Image: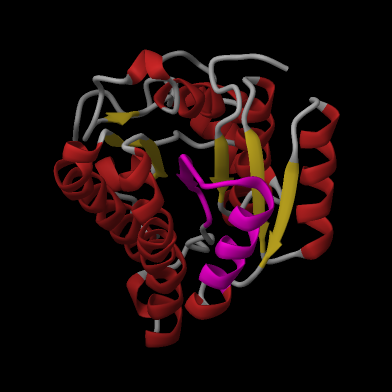
Amino acid sequence: MAGPLSDRIALVTGSGNGMGRSHAIVLAERGADIIVHDIEADAAAETARAVRATGRRAHALVADIRDVARFTAGIGEAEAALGGVSILVNNAGISGGGRKIEDVDQAVFDDMFTTQVRGAFFATRAVVPGMKTRRWGRIVNITSTWALSGFETMSHYAAAKAAIAGLTRSWAREFAPFGITVNSVAPGTVETRITLRSLGKDGIRRMAEEAPLKKLPEAADISWAVAWLASDEARIVTGQSISPNGGQVIGSG
């Protein structure tokens, strides 16, 4: 299938379920071949099947993103199978769990930053040399509106997402001479397995009622923003954040 991302190779971390799966499928629909990463083999295989159903190639990379050596070795194996990564979507993450500060011990805090921030850092470190050689690349980091506005029971989660926003701006400057753009997408609350576990159906419904548009984004709304940033249509956009959120957060925060 030809499309604006035709024959690009995209790595989408945490793409076995939820928004990550949506990102993988939308990028495939636009012509990219997908490295589907997830910690769960069955979930990765299911997304890979969905990608192949669009007519594009898929490679399942099953690894714990917290295991840097295994994860980065898996990226090398995937690139050997499909080709060099030209689009990276740093999507892998975990739920904040609705914890007040007293409920966040060192293990919880470290796991949040290891998964979200260190994971994105070393995924990027693994693929950037190839992007520099080809002098073309797109990196899209998934952050959160809570990195912009804060949230009373998610300080460790909001802080991790804000750290990724800092990486985005720094990498945009560092990689620009090589034709690599780096941007972030900060979703509003999307009903996924993770947000349901944290907020519940009632919590998500209340947020929708409070949003100016009276609705929250769906996974596809986020994926369309990701796909645009990954395309040549956004070739002059770097170091920026797009936030599809129904008006939950307005402005840069």
Say above or below: 213 vs 201: above
Q: Residue furthest bottom?
A: 106
What quarter of the picture does the C terminus occupy?
top left
Quadrant where the N terminus lies?
Answer: top right
Image-quadrant location for residue 122: bottom left
Which residue is located at x 14 percent, y 42 percent?
173
Between 29 and 222, the residue placed more toward the observer is 29
Q: Quick one: 131 or 244, which is closer to the camera? A: 131
Q: Is any part of residue 103 visible from this angle? A: no
Residue 237 located within the stretch drawn in magenta: no
Q: Residue at x 59, y 48 (%)?
A: 195
Q: Is residue 1 above or below residue 114?
A: above
Residue 24 visible, this orientation: yes
Residue at (66%, 47%) from the top-left corner? 82
Residue interval drawn in magenta: 71-92
Q: Percent position (x, y) of residue 208?
A: 53, 26
Colouring style: secondary structure
Q: Nearer the viewer, residue 57 or 211?
A: 57
